[in-house]
Amino acid sequence: MLTIVRRNGLATATILAALTLALAAFALRPGIAGAQTVTGEDTEVLNGLQIAPVNGYFDFGAGTGTNAGIVGAQCSGEFPLGGPNIPAQVVTHLTSTSTQVRVLHNNGTPLTGSVVVVCTIDFGAITTPAAVRNAFAH
């Protein structure tokens, strides 16, 4: 317990001001560079994911499902913007083990070929979102 003896009002005010500034500086100091603590949910946007659906189907593989801490996933077409393989419709399906997408042309027919998608991934309270991000990067 801190006891301040009141001898001089100015000295007491100076000590309290210095203590307040020191506590504020301690509270606002930056954390360790590169350290990340996930305490709740984290949302990541992963763009530039090149995939090659076959008959419209693509599976991102093991480590991209709810067992890996993902609580939501939504993908949409990013590229190409023209030509025969525009990823006009992308349906996302999250399973316990992986994230799967169905990619269709603008007329609803299945797309086969190389396209680029962007996915918004909602992570739950997990400790290694980087590992899951890497699983999507193939």
Image (tube, rainbow, N blue to C red):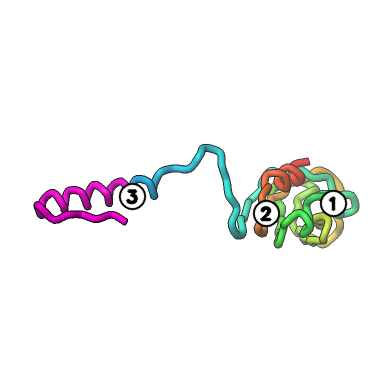
What is the x, y in percent for residue 85?
79, 48
| Separation of residues labelled 1 and 2 (CA atoms) | 25 Å
Q: Amino acid at mark 3?
A: Leu
Q: Residues within 10 Å of mark 1 (few under 14, many from 20)?
A: some
Residue located 69% across and 53% down the image = 119
Residue at (58, 49) in percent of width and height: 37
- Farthest residue to the right: give it: 55
Question: Of discs 1 and 2, which sits in the foreground?
Answer: 2
Of the image marks 2 and 3, the number of the one nearer the N terminus = 3
Q: Is residue 125 left or right of residue 96?
A: left
Give the mark nearer the N terminus: 3 vs 1: 3
Q: CA distance from mark 3 to mark 1?
A: 53 Å
For disc 1, the marked residue is: 58
| Amino acid found under the numbered disc labelled 1 | Phe
Task: Look at discs 2 and 3 and give the one toward the viewer.
Answer: 3
What numbered label is drawn on residue 23? 3
Against 109, residue 112 (above or below) is above
Question: Farthest top residue?
Answer: 33
- Which quarter of the image is occupied by the N terminus? bottom left
Q: Is residue 113 visible?
A: yes
- The image position of residue 117, as x and y in percent, is 72, 49
Q: Residues within 10 Å of mark 2 (few under 14, many from 20)?
A: some
Gap in angstroms between the C-alphas marked 2 and 3? 31 Å
Q: Is residue 136 left or right of residue 19?
A: right
Q: Which residue is mark 2?
A: 126
Left or right of residue 14, residue 40 in this image:
right
Residue stretch in magenta: 1-22
* Tags 3 and 1 touching, CB below 8 Å: no
Marks 1,2: beta carbons within 8 A? no
Q: Residue at x 62, y 55 (%)?
A: 43
The amino acid sitting under disc 2 is Ile
